[in-house]
Image (cartoon, coloured by chain):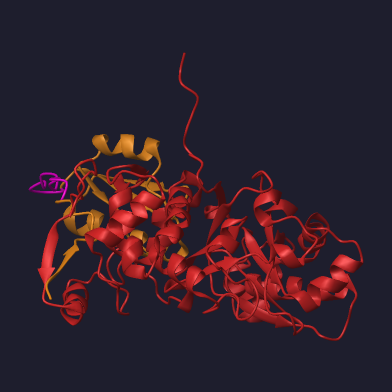
Amino acid sequence: MIIRVFDPTHEMKAAGNKPAARPSSLQGKMVGFISNGKEGTKGYFAALERMLRDELGVGEIVWRTKSNYSAPADAYIVDEIRNWHAVVAGVGD
Amino acid sequence: MHASNKPALTSKPYDVEDFAAAQEFYHSNGWTDGLPIVPPTAAAVEACLEWAVMPPDQLIGIEPVRAQPITAEKLAINAVMAGCLPMHFPAVATAWQAMMKDEFLLHGTTSSTGGCAVLVILNGPIRREIGANSTFNALANSDRATAVIGRALRLALINLLDVRPGGIDRSTFGHPGKFSYCLAEDEEDTSWQPLSVVRGIPEGASAVTVMAAMAPRQIMNEWTTDPKEILETFAAEMRANQRHYSIYGGNYAIVIAKQLREPIEKAGWTKADIAEFVYERARVRRGEWADVGKGSIVRDRAGKIHTALASPDHLLVIAAGGPAGGFGAVIPPWMGSKTKAVTAAIGACVDCEPPKS
């Protein structure tokens, strides 16, 4: 006997967002780090900063830390992103 | 067949050969928790909506981080899959409204590596109406109602917010409560106020409380009738959780079974008295972390006191459990105070505001 059933998911397509344009070079550029504030991110971002400065010539690194590691970045941090050429976010534990 | 005046369901329909084919279809699409589901037919879904007096497109809420709307129809489909009867659906819908309050931090609690589950506590007349059992085997497979309500929340998280293991759900470990985690308070066999009343819901109203909760830690103390000694065992378990899991304070729940409740009640202690005592006793020095292998993060703050509860009212005291046995349970929060337990009356709009003049 045929049973008609229904899709339990949200059935939403992806919102249509697309990645920001990638800079061709990071030489002299400003890069933001958004940390979730967990202990393990300190060493990771410190090493990444050295690499970006030494190997890719990044001009300035801006460190910002979320007030709650399990929530989206605070509004004032999101507002700052427009001033940066690139941002590193979403790094977990 | 749809009656002419009944709004049609708008979810995508699929025709499957039979019950077994439905199982394979839902499993293969990643739409289940691994257990068999009840096929969500139009009749079953519509019966849930009719019971709750909700049209299919009624907005239950919007998940605040991903701006994902949750409709009554989608929630009812998942509730049917979980095994809910129509009478269970209002509790599911209200729990979801509560989970979408900002203070619950739904995205954080469901995506964290520190895997927690959503604990649902039922209060009020609905417990009796749906046959929820508050006694034997509480916190597990005690009855149909709590089993399916808890499961419905998880299936809807999977399907409506993509909270699948390895997807949005990044839990390092989960716990069995992620299949279903629902408890009804034993209001008939205690002199204490129901949890919902303690948390501001009018007496006589049905309500749900949701809490982002770790697995229950069972305690035993059958060798005293002194309320302070009994509650010291609960506080000790909370201190152990602070030392071994997270030192930070949050909403803890303690579930006290009848054998331990009776002497506490007989001594005249209310839930407020219990919370006050536990607040004072459940605290550790940061330096204790060094005793359990976490000395590197004590730093120069060894003397700092961390309370398990920010204030006594952060403790959820619940009467439940079988009639015999000197047992209780401590249910720790997920990651301290980053999430707050939320209580909502069933049938009441938790986000309604007076019309603007």
Decide which of B215, A86 is in the foreground and name it: B215
Quarter of the image for residue B84 reads bottom left
Residue reaching furthest left? Answer: A24
Q: Residue at x 51, y 69 (%)?
A: B146
Across and down, in percent, residue B102 comes to 46, 44
Decide which of B316, B105 is in the foreground and name it: B316
Question: Per the image, is B212 magenta?
Answer: no
Which SS does the magenta portion mostly show? loop
Q: Is residue B340 left or right of residue B281?
A: left
Q: Can residue B341 be seen from the camera position used here? A: no
Across and down, in percent, residue A58 comes to 22, 49
Q: Residue at x 20, y 78 (%)?
A: B19
Q: Can residue B261 be seen from the camera position used here? A: yes
Q: Colour of chain B?
A: red
Quadrant housing the N terminus of chain B: bottom left
Q: Write down the region rendered in magenta.
A: A14-26
Across and down, in percent, residue B149 comes to 45, 65
Count of marks, rendered view: 0
Q: Is residue B9 left or right of residue B227?
A: left
Q: Which chain is orange?
A: A
Q: Is residue B300 left or right of residue A42?
A: right
Across and down, in percent, residue A77 comes to 36, 40
- In the displayed structure, B245 sits above or below B67; it is below
Q: Residue at x 30, y 62 (%)?
A: B44
Q: Is residue B356 left or right of residue B223?
A: left
- In the displayed structure, B189 sits above or below B310; it is below
Quarter of the image for residue B303 reads bottom right
